[in-house]
Every structure is written in C-alpha cells, then in structure tokens.
Amino acid sequence: MGDFLDVKGFRVYPGWLDRAAQEQLVEHLRAVLMQAPLVQPVTPRGKPMSVRMGACGDYGWVTDRKGYRYEPRHPQGMGWPPIPEAVLAIWRDVSGCARLPECCLINWYGEGARMGLHQDKDEGDFSCPVVSVSLGDDGLFRMGNVERGGKTESVWLKSGDVVVMGGAARLAHHGVDRIRFGSSTLLRDGGRINLTLRVVTAAA
C-alpha cells in the first residue's frame, strides 16, 4: 500500500492511478454507462442535483421524491451492470476490508457542479470503509466531522487520487465545493468522475 495523507482521519492517496490506468478505467465506465446511463437525480424535496449519477454492482444509490436509498435496479428498470474488475482491484488494494463492495456509485460533475456536505449513512455495515476514486478535473474535497458544524479541511483531489473513508472518518461529513473545469485532459468533454465504493448490506 502506498503513502497517504491523513486528513481528519480520511486517508488520501495522491496519484494512486497513473494515466494509463485512468484511461483504462474510463473505458470500463463508458461500457457501464452504455448499459445503465447517467440520470439527473432530485432530492426528496424535489430539487434537482447538480451532479449526474449512475452506478454498477448489486445496488445503486438513488434519490427521488421517495427518499435516499439503495435500489437493485436502475430508475429506467434495468439491472445495474457488474463492477469492473479494475475498480474492484482498487478496493482490494486500499480498503483493508474482507467484504467486496456491493455498489459503485458513479457521479459526474460538469462545470459548476458541486456536492454539499453530507454523510454516507444508508449502508448496513459501517465497519467497511467507503473508497472514493477521482477521475478527470480537479475537485475541492471538503472534510468535516461526524456532527454537523465545526472546523473543516479541504484538499484538491486530482485525477487518479483515491480516498479511503473508514474508522473515525467513516461517518464524517464531506462534500465537493467546486471543480476546476478543464483542468484535466482525461475526459473528452471535461468534467470530473467520482466513484465511491460501498458495502451496502449488513454483515451476515
């Protein structure tokens, strides 16, 4: 396992994926999204989110007027494609978790997109971390506390960076304040892809 930065308990692995690995991952994700396309979700209050979302694995995380939850099927009715092996390899290398992820959420940030501070708390096994992979444009990642409020810290995540949210950071608030649109040449039309790998169900 490579060197990492510890920021408020979040383990940040800069440059975990080299350019060739990033390009290969993007090709795998294109194949996934051909089968289960990105959607623009709305919050339970009906407000459209600025990111577009997709997923692969046994479950996808969705939000709509019915609330936040995991679903075994895409909003259009098809099953989610399997998680690519190249993505699972990242989990095996950095997670320290014996269980494999059951959901890989795919968030696409276009120009002006952001993600407010939130907790990942819809899962059934908090002993497993959430693993985040950044591809494309730089994103300003804000890390907070388990309780709302208090001091936060931010770091610019670049393409190929990986973050592990486990232990004390597993339920900490986090978000993306903004992206530097056009800062990377990885994606043809710019933007940022963020993958988050999660174990969804409770341990047997």
Image: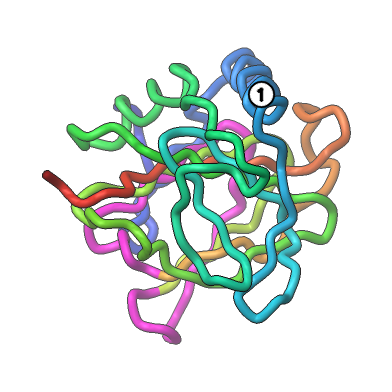
Quadrant containing the C terminus in the rendered view: top left
Highlighted magenta segment, given as a residue range:
145-172
Image x and y of residue 166, in percent: 28, 53
- Furthest toward the left, the residue is 204
Q: Answer left or right for 128 relative to 13.
A: left
Q: Residue at x 73, y 42 (%)?
A: 137
Image x and y of residue 161, in percent: 53, 37
Viewer-side residue, 111 vs 27:
27
Q: Answer left or right for 101 relative to 110.
A: left
Dot 1 lies on which element? helix
Q: Which residue is mark 1?
A: 26
Q: Residue at x 78, y 43 (%)?
A: 191
Viewer-side residue, 66 vs 199:
66
Viewer-side residue, 53 vs 76:
76
Quadrant containing the N terminus in the rendered view: top left
Image x and y of residue 146, in percent: 33, 75
Q: Residues within 10 Å of mark 1 (few under 14, many from 20)?
A: some
- Does 79 lie within the magenta span? no
Image x and y of residue 180, in percent: 78, 51
Vertical placement of 58 versus 122: above or below? above
Q: Answer left or right for 195 relative to 33.
A: left
Q: Answer left or right for 82 relative to 178.
A: left
